Amino acid sequence: MAQLYFRVGLGTRPARFEHSFRAYPDYGTHQAGYVIAAGLAPFVDWMHGASFDDDAADALRSLRSGTGDAIFGDDFLDWMREQGGFGDVSLWSVPEGRVVHRNTPIAVVEAPLAVAQLLESSLLNHLNYAALIATKASRVVEAAHGGSVLEFGLRRAHGFGGNGATRAALIGGADFSSNVGVSHELGIPSKGTHGHSMVQVFMAIAGGEIEAFRAYADVYPDDCLLLVDTINTLESGVPNAIRVFEELKSRGHRPVGIRLDSGDLAYLAVRSAAMLNAAGFADTSIVLSSQLDELTIWQIRNQILEEAPRYGLDVDQMLSRLVYGVGSRMVTSDGDPSFDGVYKAVAVENEAGDWEPAIKISDSPDKLALPGAKSLWRVYDERGIATADVIGLEGEDIERRPLEVLHPTRPGVGRVLGADRVSSIEPLLEPVVSRGRVVAELGSIEVARSRRTADLARLDTGVRRLVNPHTYHVSVTRPLLELKQSLIEAHSRD
Amino acid sequence: MAQLYFRVGLGTRPARFEHSFRAYPDYGTHQAGYVIAAGLAPFVDWMHGASFDDDAADALRSLRSGTGDAIFGDDFLDWMREQGGFGDVSLWSVPEGRVVHRNTPIAVVEAPLAVAQLLESSLLNHLNYAALIATKASRVVEAAHGGSVLEFGLRRAHGFGGNGATRAALIGGADFSSNVGVSHELGIPSKGTHGHSMVQVFMAIAGGEIEAFRAYADVYPDDCLLLVDTINTLESGVPNAIRVFEELKSRGHRPVGIRLDSGDLAYLAVRSAAMLNAAGFADTSIVLSSQLDELTIWQIRNQILEEAPRYGLDVDQMLSRLVYGVGSRMVTSDGDPSFDGVYKAVAVENEAGDWEPAIKISDSPDKLALPGAKSLWRVYDERGIATADVIGLEGEDIERRPLEVLHPTRPGVGRVLGADRVSSIEPLLEPVVSRGRVVAELGSIEVARSRRTADLARLDTGVRRLVNPHTYHVSVTRPLLELKQSLIEAHSRD
């Protein structure tokens, strides 16, 4: 496509592309009602490092047509070498960590047409996956109700995508990760526990489980968290852990806790807690792992609510000591492992230097994109709760009251918001890159995390529901709707 | 764990770890009955490039315990620096592209205990994901029944994992990929098509769909494959494509075909084929894309079987012109996006220099691993069809007849195979790395693809079934079963 634009004289023509998604993740038995934006800083880093060099030109030069001719001409490859990279790109985006909604422009690229087109695969690859995992993590963290969440997914993450998953999960609210490398780069301590193999090794040649636990306590007296299910959790693991905890305590150390990784986690957590409490270790943590996701965490907490009192346990104390080690199902977004974000041309400059809106109509109505250079706002109601995201044409007056907002696809459906119904209106897209120069502060995980927390506090609890969430309003302005309809009519007459 | 082994004097003790998986991918509505091994060459490359350098030591040195003390001591970090990397590792594996089965050792590591332990995350990260995608691709290719399969997934793959997905999909049988970079590295031409944005741009400022198609035909006269659903497939896209194909033909070129990316793909393919045939373009391809996987391809082919005759089309000719562009659902293994491969200690050398078997018992019986240094064989029946994978102790005589093979968990269940029932027995694990030196030919996609083809031809069609496949036999020898039972009894008495 880039070569074609170059050949027809449109290679450097300014164009706008938008990143948006059509559907919230649907995990089958549960569904997301919102998405957490993520991946922006790594994408901008990639864009800065990428260049069209001689190796790239040679690789393309070697590609052959069906007839054996070169697909790419030297004229085009030379021109690409002159372009060099993405120095002419401007980018606006909703910042990382913020709540975003379907069918809204969450990132906007303005660049020479050929350059904007070349960005497509990398932009989608970076932003789609990160948003998918940040969203999943956010749901896991909501299900944990304040319990710590550790990201444990590297072993089953999708190759080197696992590093991006760690960063996205931390933005989505996970407290720590066992990924030592990425945690170090991000300045967040990594947290993990030992595995079964350590106990197995001691069982094979150096005693048994108790000797393994004792060795661990000797090496890590102040970080002693023991995996108790290698033989039998209640018969062997917990009693052995308690013996070692008593030895640690007598030497003046405070044991950290135990980890359960198999069996009925809720039942074993309650039984283990009762045993730990009876031995005077009520302040130890109980880390749960093994195929956890938001739904299993929800079920485990509910089961504990019922079972804990039967063993004389205080429910609040019991729940507050739980830590969730969440791996495969979070970093692969189990149930819906791909985010359907798309990158579509929405406007191209005409010869007069004005934006000409672009549209795709297609045979699937849900694949229809909104045309034109646009803006995105969030409207907060009188309670300060987000009531709608509104898409309009760039330069439209959003301050007028009453504000009319319309359904993007259902004719005649809309709302009129009076001044009493609107506490504030916030533009969501922020400038990130201006003609190749980064103009936003990017990359802080802490800042992204606090954006998420603030946005969730202003989001209807119905929209945050883990199963069958309430549908958040995404509306358009009348001028945008009229533009879309006139373009559909014009192209239907072609 | 590595520091602990070092501190208790076991850091350099030889140990064996095995990679195996417990369950075939289950996509919910359909299930895999086999897995395709993949990821070995990239893993070995990674292992060779990885080293424990000063930066790594400094990163670990900065990690703090709960009390603020350093978690890792200088003694251990200095020792790790001396180890340097993975130069003492030996590795055996089932080669890439081969069919493998659950609960069998598909890769075996022998290395100093601390080093073998450090490999865990990277080995699992490399091998789990690649096997998952090679398996999914193999199923997609089987569903396509000889139709070309193009891997289109980078936009929604999991970050940089998308590159590994491309390689794994090619091993699994995909013909080509749109991932230009990885295709180039692997020496396989990349294949793709244009997107909607190209048509949208022409609609906005340079005419319309026909002008876009004409420009594409001018630039790529011998590779002209047109995406026909930007406005309306049957009313606009296909008629415009046919006009441009006629112009190409009059200039002596042969048009390649069309791509359908929305709507009812089977119906639109049949209607488009009828229009193309009527215009004299029966030899053009029809590329289908949009959320394809093995099940949708199966359904599309079945629908075409019914619908094609109604439009006077030859069914075989119709099916043979189809090409499948498969993206998100293949590279994310939609339905089951994580492969449950594990890496478990199975034996450690004792002070006498003999292997001492290691076992994990756990509270979930399906998580029980087979102990000891083991071998893996495949038994072919009198028809040359694989009838069982058999796991035994290293050094066992597998040539004895009759051969008794036992169910690994159900007591008393087994089979006795006479000489007339066994045509051959093949060892599956091959030496790959011997004390750091690569001793196998790795990396050829073509060789891996031909291994897959040969193995599938020798696999029961019931096991290859896309839905509810027949269960393949995985058996153990009596000496291995007795070792496992004696260890369980010994540790239950602890």
Image (cartoon, coloured by chain):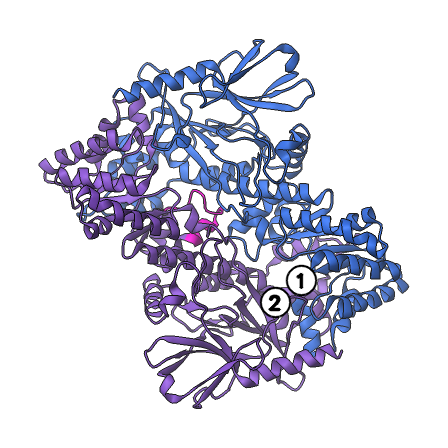
Chain colours: A blue, B purple
Do the dots labelled 1 and 2 sit on one chain?
Answer: no
User: Picture quarter containing residue B451?
Assistant: bottom left
Q: Is residue B157 one of those drawn in magenta?
A: yes
**Residue at 30% over, 47% down:** B303
Q: Which residues are magenta?
A: B152-165
Question: Disc 2 marks which residue?
Answer: B367
Q: CA distance from mark 1 to mark 2?
A: 8 Å
Residue B209 picture location, percent across and down:
26, 28
Residue A169 appears in the picture as rendered: yes
Pointer 2: residues within 10 angstroms few (<14), some, or many (20+)?
some
Residue at the far top: name it: A401
User: Picture quarter containing residue B270?
Assistant: top left
Q: Chain of mark 2?
A: B
Amino acid beneath label 2: Lys
User: Does residue B285 lie above or below A215 as drawn?
Assistant: above
Q: Chain of mark 1?
A: A
Pointer 1: residues within 10 angstroms few (<14), some, or many (20+)?
many
Dot 1 lies on which element?
loop
Q: Quadrant of the C terminus of chain B?
A: bottom right
Question: Disc 1 marks which residue?
Answer: A262
Residue B39 picture location, percent across and down:
45, 61
